[in-house]
Amino acid sequence: MPVLVLVSSLAVGAWLHYGFSLTRSSMAASQSPAVTRWRSIEICRGGNRKARRLTCIVDGDTGWEDGVKWRLNGVDTPEISRPACAKERRTAIAARDRLRDLMSGGYRIEWIGSSGSYGRKLVRIRLADGRYAGRTLMREGLAQPWPNSGNVWCEF
């Protein structure tokens, strides 16, 4: 019994300190509190992601959370689907894989409250260690600020 109380006290303390919820929310993304996830994130495959309520990564700046498509606010990563050169494709895959790696350690989606291009909800992703995923990708050379003046991954 004392061990159970200690674990519960630690969980409540972490929740109060960090504002994390360790359970899935059934509320709509526009209304949901930020939810911290502690698991591997899959690469998106197949269609009908909204109806299937998928949580997955499309590329370095786009993903799905419980069937809601999101885009990192103020961040641009290389294109996987339509790269302008081989280096852009390699960097795009590296950015996607790095985002998956960062998020697999735990993350919290902060919904901005507005939508970007293609109707994607704008978000910030705070990692379990307090860093923001977008800033980390930029610092590592896998992303650039958005909006920007063009493709920095290909030399034309």
Image (cartoon, rainbow, N blue to C red):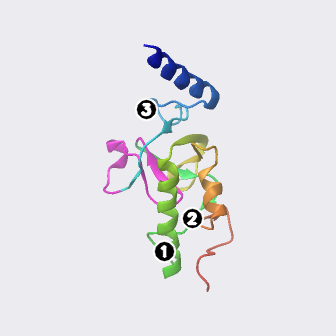
Contact between marks 3 and 2 (CB within 8 A): the answer is: no
Q: CA distance from mark 3 to mark 2?
A: 28 Å
Please give the residue where the numbered disc 2 appears in the rendered image: 77
Q: How many marks?
A: 3
Q: Quadrant of the C terminus?
A: bottom right
Sequence-wise first label, 3 or 2: 3
Please give the residue where the numbered disc 1 appears in the rendered image: 90
Residue 50 position (above or below residue 144):
above
Q: Is residue 140 left or right of residue 56?
A: right
**Residue 48 forms part of the magenta stretch:** yes
Sequence-wise first label, 2 or 1: 2
Q: Residue 114 in the image: x percent, y percent?
A: 60, 44
**Residue 98 forms part of the magenta stretch:** no
Residue sitting at x 51%, y 56%: 99
SS category of the residue bearing label 3? loop
Crowding around mark 1 (Cα neighbors within 10 Å: few <14, some 14 to 19, many 20+) is some
Q: Residue 93 in the image: x percent, y percent?
A: 47, 68
Q: Is residue 85 visible?
A: no
Q: Is residue 26 visible?
A: yes
Q: Which residues are magenta?
A: 45-66
Amino acid marked by disc 3:
Arg
Please give the residue where the numbered disc 3 appears in the rendered image: 24
Sequence-wise first label, 3 or 1: 3
Residue sitting at x 47%, y 49%: 104
SS category of the residue bearing label 2? loop
Q: Where on the picture, by quarter, is residue 108?
A: top right
Name the front one of labels 2 and 1.
1
Amino acid marked by disc 2:
Thr
Q: Is residue 1 left or right of residue 13?
A: left
Of all residues shown, which one is farthest toward the front?
2
